Amino acid sequence: MNRINYLKRCYRLNIKRSYQSQVVTHGVLRSRLEKTTKQKDPVIQSKEDAHNYLRKNSQFIATVDPLGLREREDGIMSTIFNEFSSQEAEHLKNTYCQNVAFDLEHLNDEDEKAWLYHQIENSSFELTKEKQKEICAHLLKSQVFENFLAKRFPTLKRYSGEGAESMLAMFEELFHISSKSGTNEVMISIPHRGRLALLTGMLNYPNKALFSKLKGNPEFHSSLRFIGDVSSHLTSSTDLNYNDKNIHVTMVPNPSHLEASHPVIMGKARSRFLTKQQAYYNGENENSEDELLNILSIQVHGDAAMAGQGIVMETFALASLPHFEVGGSVHLVVNNQLGFTTPHERASTAGHSSDIAKMISAPIIHVNGDSPEDVAKVTKLAVDYRNKFKKDVVINMLCFRRWGHNELDDPTFTNPAMYDVIHQRESVPDLYKKKLIQDGVVTETEIESIESEYYALLDEQLKDADRQVEPAWKPFEDNWKGIQQASHQSASTWDTGCDIDLLKFVGARSTCFPDQFNIHQHLEKTFCEARMKKIESGENIDWATAEALAIGSLLMQGHHVRISGQDVGRGTFSHRHSMLVDQKNNELYIPLNHMSKQQSGCLEVVNSLLSEEAVLAYEYGMSIENPKHLVIWEAQFGDFFNGAQIIIDTYIANAEAKWLLQSGLVMLLPHGMDGAGPDHSSSKIERFLQMSDSKEDGVDSDDVNMQIVNPTTAAQYFHLLRRQQIRNFRKPLIVASPKLILRMSAASSTLSDLVPGTHFKPVIGDSSPDMDKIDTVVFCSGKHYYELAKQRTKQSKQNVAIVRLD
């Protein structure tokens, strides 16, 4: 028996495993491996029973697997249709038993479910001949493109989309529908698989620029400092024209860490709403809901990563939360039914990798990737659902991977049965072109013309690739005009002080609340009254007050500020209280958003869900869309940033070097051995210092990958926050923020420390000792200064100077 028949026999026997363990395998219980869930045969007593059975079980009935390896439940089908007329039976067979299946029974909202079933069973979808030709052209060009790269760059790991080309039909239909429904911006996050074909085939990324990079030439202008990235991480931002309307399409850069880019694109989409003052940021006018259609977020997943990466669950958890929702995302799972070498059954306990979306009650539509037209059909349904309900929806496109994980890898070592099937079958573009020729939509001559002309075009562009190539993407445009790369020759000092009248105004307004507001009695005394005394005296400006003055002054100058993290409204150490809660009705009030009718900036206070990775990625996405948005993420304790280490390693620490993407994101990491014990004491400053590209043999300029600080006074913190927005460049700021000195009087400042002419001091010298007696200089950072100064006084050490490295 050959391997194909053997595998099919296994599936008939309901042994749903690509790997078989007929011989005892160390670490595996064969009885557990072969255990299956046996469902009772349904009782069909009426037309309604039969109809419901089809609705609930289409994923087990329909031919959604292009390789034919998934078991189908068709034993009862012969009796199901006895309940219907021949016309009804034919309609239901076409709806539920062909290339599309629906998984909707988990939906919590019965109205949504009813709407979906009505659309599925009553809406007709027919592609025009012109649209069929467009889809066919995209698929054929993709195939020519992949074959061209294979021939001209045979050692390139291009992570082709061969086997998943119908993904292009999804994007073609999505752009078409979006232009009709009022969407003017589409934001895409997509991993490596098929990325290059999408970029060059549909998103206007010049083939010549790609070929130039593959030949080893720089992808940006020589005047810019960068190191670049691999070709499978390239990106694009372009205008497309559909139905005589422009749609701006942005593909966010992705690292090799799968799924990490999805919360980034959500944050970028959210930030775009803020920039345009739409939807969540337009004052709840009557157009708010409609404005959610303006920006559409698309997330493309691989099947193994969808099932395996924890950030997927975290990102889904953000989807409908206040301050994180983006009006719903459309998800496409490019389901190869295989990870690198591991089959689905060994990587997920779910029937489909898309089952994770059930946690947010998202509709899931399964579709056979061999049918581009059905992929286009379900795309319309998915976008229509998203536009109506403003919620996430998932398309699970079952397809295959023509080669190994990359084209140099041999998948037959570990997946021989699957690849026996794959190597014997035709490609998706070839199947579709044959269908259209047979249907009389196109001729063989037209097909040959598309293929030969595109190959000739690629050939010509390859010849030109060694000439001066215009960069495919230019930084510092649109919102980023006026921003530039930081100087690599010197470190600049920026006057970040404010007029004292503005400081007093902001300070006073930061404690105000409406007369009818029921504030907590303790806060009225220790927060509002105490802060007013500090503002009036100009003395004892503590950490929280300095933060409020920095943020409030930026709001008055037109910058938007967002602070996000676990419990940031109050602050882990109950010091911030930027968000007041009415003690009788739980109403929220943010004083800094009500300072003046003339203020053009607003503060968004976001008590996030209990996650670090997806939330930090989201806030990073917020920060890269507009330099006028100050985005702050605070860890509950500094130790907990390690839950987001991937985002720090792949975006925050090196995105500018790889992609020329600047970010002014601020990370506040409470730090200090202040009685909290393990996991609550260290922001691991040493890790950030190790990740920094700070020089070891010279003085740093402004051009470091991130700036790491351990400020010792409230004024220093004030200037740091304002400096993030005042400078003409952006850098991530890592703050080892305090615990003990949040309220320490010695660490407080005066309003005179914050006026024009003042600035952040990287080094604070010691002005107290008699310089003639100094024979010892101690360098330190953070709260250690106060302990050392205390001991110096106690021991009368007049020969010791203490220098702070903030």
Image (spheres, rainbow, N blue to C red):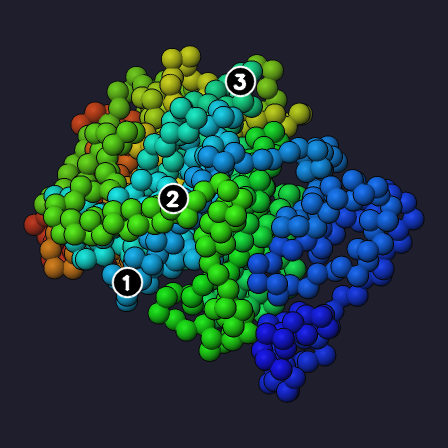
Location of residue 623 by image quarter:
top left
Reply above or below: 405 against 92.
Answer: below
Q: Amino acid at mark 3?
A: Asn
Give 444 or 255, whichever is nearer the viewer: 444
Q: Residue at position x 55%, y 74% from top?
A: 417
Label 1 or label 2, whichever lies nearer to me, is: 2
Q: Position of residue 197 (x, y in %)?
A: 36, 50
Toward the bottom, the furthest residue is 23
Q: Which quadrant is the N terminus positioned in?
A: bottom right
Asked if residue 606 can be seen in this view, the reply is no
User: Are discs 1 and 3 less than 8 Å apart at CB?
Assistant: no
Residue 646 horizontal/vertical position (percent): 40, 56
Query: How dense is the environment of label 3, judged by Cα within 10 Å: few (below 14), some, or many (20 and up)?
Result: few
- In the rendered structure, which disc, 1 or 2, sits on the residue that comes first in sequence? 1
Mark 1 vs mark 3, CA separation in Å: 53 Å
Question: What's the residue at 59%, 50% (across, down)?
Answer: 367
Mark 1: which amino acid? Lys
Residue behind mark 3: 287
Say which element carries label 2. Answer: helix
Q: Residue at x 18, y 41 (%)?
A: 470
Question: In which quarter of the view is residue 698 placed?
Answer: bottom left
Point out the residue furthest to the right here.
45
Residue 446 - label: 2
Secondary structure under tag 1 reads helix
Left or right: where 87 falls relative to 668: right
Residue lying at 39% horizontally and 58% vertically, measured from the top left: 160
Residue, disc 1: 151
Question: Marks 1 and 2, how far apart in space?
Answer: 24 Å
146 vs 648, nearest the viewer: 146
Q: Position of residue 619 (x, y in %)?
A: 42, 41
